[in-house]
Every structure is written in C-alpha cells, then in structure tokens.
Amino acid sequence: MTALVTGASRGLGAEIARRLARDGHPVAVNYLPDRADAERVAAGIVAAGGVAAAFRADVTDPAAVTSLVAAVQQRFGPVAVLVANATGPQPAVPALELTWQDHLNQLEFFVKSPTLLMRAVAPGMRALGGGRIIHIGSDLPERAEPGMSAYSAAKAAQASLTRTRARELGPDGITVNIVAPGWIPVERHAAVDVAHVEAYRRDVPLGRMGTPAEVADVVAFLASDQSRFVTGERITVNGGHTIG
C-alpha cells in the first residue's frame, strides 16, 4: 500500500516516512525546499531495505498537488495511505496584532492543503476499495497558548474536518483520523532554551518529552489493518499534558 507523507524531509514527517517504510509501504517522501534532506530520508529507507523516493511539491498549490499524486501513482501505484503532515512557519502573534492574513497563512496548511490532497487521492483509494487519510494535528487548541490563536484555530478546523470527512468517505472504505502531538522537539527546535524545555516537561504527567518515533508509531497503527474500524478519531500523543 503506497504511502504519501507530506513535509517528510525532516522532523516528524521524516520519522513517519521511515516507520511506514519499515511496515512495508512504498513511501513517497514529499518536500518543498529541502531536496537534499528529502533525498537523504529516501536513500536511508532504501538502504534499510525499504522502497522510497523523494517528490517535490508545494502541497498548498492545486496544480502541484495534482501533479504530485500523479507522479507518485506512476512510480508506486495509487496512494492508499495519505499522511498530511506539511506545515509552514508558526510565528507567535499577540491577539491585538493578529490579522486576517495571519489566519489565512495557517489555514493554507491545515485546511486548504488537506482538502487538495484528499480530493487528489480519494479516487485512487475508491478504486482500491479503501484507504487511510491521517492528519497530523496538535494539542494547542486545548492548551490555549498565548500568541498562537491563528495556528490553534486552524488546527481546530483541521480536527473538525477530520470528523466530517470520516462520515462522508466511510462508505468508500476510507478512514480519516487525526494524530495530535504535544510539543515534540525536532531539528527546528535545536535553539530552544533548555529551561523552556524543562518547564514544559514538568507539566507532562509521564515526566518526559515525547519523541518523533512515538508519534510515528500511532500513525503506523492508523495506517495499518489493525485500525480498520477506527475513523473520525483524534488521538492525542502528549504524555497526558492536556488531561483536564
């Protein structure tokens, strides 16, 4: 079952791509600016005995998404597993400085892009008799982090879309779920102050930070036949950080 992972040149996306490859999926490693990183991820998968290739595309652009899915299908066959992981800059903007454009910048990645991707892969999934659509969300809507209202609103919209699309696509055998990580430090967090990390960790009931592999494990479950009767669900992966 071919898997397409967007934004997979580094961070969570790269780990998800590697995990799905270990489960036997041919993996399309999507990237936009980081060609060398994406090719390194794909080459690592191949070196480990898996099947993968890097595919460049801006997944917020309709024509680019259409071309991406066509290229993946030509190389590996229809996409049976879609992981919508790609994201953009996530600046903190105080509420009184927030503009509509700030909202649109986040909606591009968490509403527009998943919609374009869904429409592009759904016909192939229907032909296969089913498929898996997995969104990578966030626990920030519950945390109400100051300065992150545009990002949080877009992530909340993404979760709502997941539930509605699960109902609509269920008759075609397509499940739609969302994995909502807490703060999982990856490469782009290398410069974050250690004291900030420690303050966050103290609020996690399990007493530690999560890892990209722990997010990838949940994605792998949702991509597998073991989750065949699970749809419309939001699975939070944050060590209990948002327990009420």
Image: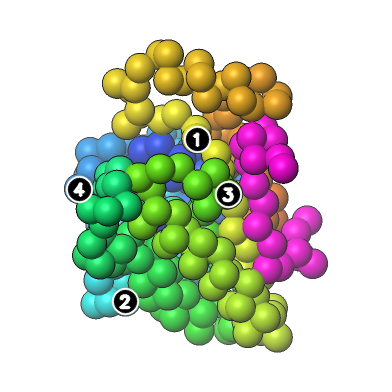
Q: Position of residue 42 (x, y in %)?
A: 38, 42
- Which label's residue is closer to the chain start, 4 or 1? 4
- Which label's residue is closer to the chain start, 4 or 2? 4
Q: Which residue is mark 4?
A: 33
In front of the other: 151 or 188: 151
| Label 2: which secondary element | helix
Tell me the CA gap for discs 4 and 1. 23 Å
At a point 55% along the width and 39% down the height, the residue shown is 182
Tell me the quadrant of the picture where the N terminus can be found.
Answer: bottom right
Bounds of the magenta segment: 225-244
| Label 1: which secondary element | loop
Q: What is the basis of the colouring in this image?
A: rainbow
Q: Which residue is mark 1?
A: 183
Tell me the CA gap for discs 3 and 4. 31 Å
Type of residue at label 2?
A: Thr
At a point 70% along the width and 26% down the height, the residue shown is 205
| Label 3: which secondary element | helix
Q: Which residue is mark 3?
A: 142
Residue 227 falls within the magenta-colored stretch: yes
Residue found at the far front of this picture: 96
Q: Nearer the viewer, mark 3 or mark 2?
A: 3
Tell me the CA gap for discs 1 and 3. 13 Å
So how many labels did they put on this image? 4
Type of residue at label 4?
A: Pro
Disc 2: CA contacts within 10 A as few (<14), some (14-19) or many (>=20):
some
